[in-house]
Amino acid sequence: MKLSVSFKLLYLKIIDCVMKNPKKLIRLFILSDCCIIVFFQLWHFKSKFLWPPTSTYLDFHLNESMYYPAITFCREPSFKNEVMSKYNLSFHPSITTSWKNFPFNETSLADLYEEATYTRDEFFGSYWLDGKSENIDIVMTLHFSYGKCYTLLPLVTTDLPWKQSGYEVILYHDFKKELFQESRDEFGFRQGWNMYLHEPREEFTEYGISSSGRIENLFLEVNEEIELKMQVNHYSQFRGRGSVCSDDVIRSASICREKCVLRYVEDSIDCSGPWMKKPETSLCNNYDKVKGLINEYKNSEKECGCMNPCETTIYSSFVMNRKIYDKHDVPSSKISIYFTSKMVTNLEERSGYDSAQFVADMGGSLSFLLGLSVIGFIIVLEKILGYLFLDKLVENYMQKKEAKKQAELEETKGAKEAKFLDM
């Protein structure tokens, strides 16, 4: 009852105030609207500051020296047809039905992959970078679909952007030219080499082809000569709030994903294949396990959470010349890869909204809609603090001062009375 009476009195006071001075109502209405608008604007500014948009900056610069990409060659077809036929297998191990006739009691998967794939000498005729083969290191990797692939890693940088300073590689093939008019086998598949250009730190993996997006792929056919011009693009990802990337220059996203998927497949089937690196289980030794291993490997969609690097270099290639190559007695091909300039394209992501812009937007919104300057803001802050704390502190201070003064008066009065009694 008392509460309703209080509300009625408050309502009557407001009506009385409005009737006496309606300008105050207009001011109150406008101030309320401005406060609501300012609140939403400040909330928007805060969201932009916590999750800033990105801006992209493009610039060019000239390198003093040039670092060439790693080149991975994978042969097509990847396996020797006569060896696969010897073990009652199809031309490619991905065809699971042919494994029913594989002699598991006589041969292991490791022996099959070793015998059916191509050695380094069967791959390369010659190779050099900047005129020397010592400037290249060759690393072999084994894969389920591609068999043995070989990666050429540059060991030096070059100073001059011309053909003689780049890669020059001659590759050998066992293509039977007298049996086939075109560079295709009896199954209609092209014969030659899949070639992948990538950063040296990004080791080549079968999963890296589809997942990284940073690999340049070309196909070199048998008896073909290609000249490629290289172009370098360097990308720097914004390392702000919400971005997911790694600053580890050694870490390889493709290797991370491959290890994750292979470990998942191995745990699911409880056996391994010879292309798996450092397996913890033995090789699959019967048809059912091999079939399960292949199907799980091909169809795995395991989410691994591997982070891409924040700094990425992508090598783009452009075909300068393409012609027939028949300078050797055996089927072969030649490829030349080189830079034609020292120009490097840098593409950098930066924060599109920083603390300075946040303060400027906040100050502009407050000053425009509420008419607050720095001095006005200080006065308002003093008023608020005064209402909340300062008035109470001053009141307490005055009470203590008054109590102290009263105590001193009583003490003085007591001293005078004592002196009077002594007299």
Image (cartoon, rainbow, N blue to C red):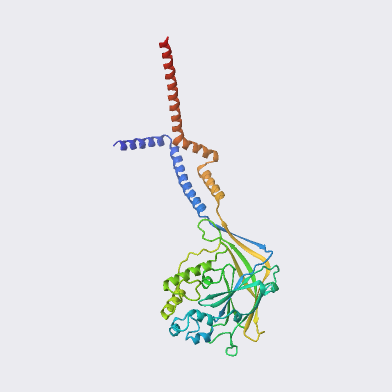
Q: Nearer the viewer, residue 322 or 19?
A: 322
Would you say 373 lies left or right of 419 here? right
Q: Position of residue 134 (x, y in %)?
A: 67, 73
Q: Is residue 219 above or below residue 378?
A: below
Q: Is residue 287 above or below residue 210?
A: below
Query: Which residue is painted at 40% across and 35% down in the image?
Result: 17
Would you say 99 lies left or right of 66 here? left
Report which quarter residue 176 is drawn in. bottom right
Q: Position of residue 62 (x, y in %)?
A: 68, 63
Q: Position of residue 82 (x, y in %)?
A: 53, 87
Q: Nearer the viewer, residue 175 or 360?
A: 175
Q: Is residue 422 above or below residue 253?
A: above
Q: Quadrant of the N terminus?
A: top left
Q: Nearer the viewer, residue 370 or 280?
A: 280
Tell me if I can see residue 187 in this picture.
no
Q: Is residue 296 above or below residue 244?
A: below
Report which quarter residue 19 is drawn in. top left
Tell me if I can see residue 383 in this picture.
yes
Name of the residue lying farthest toward the bottom: 178
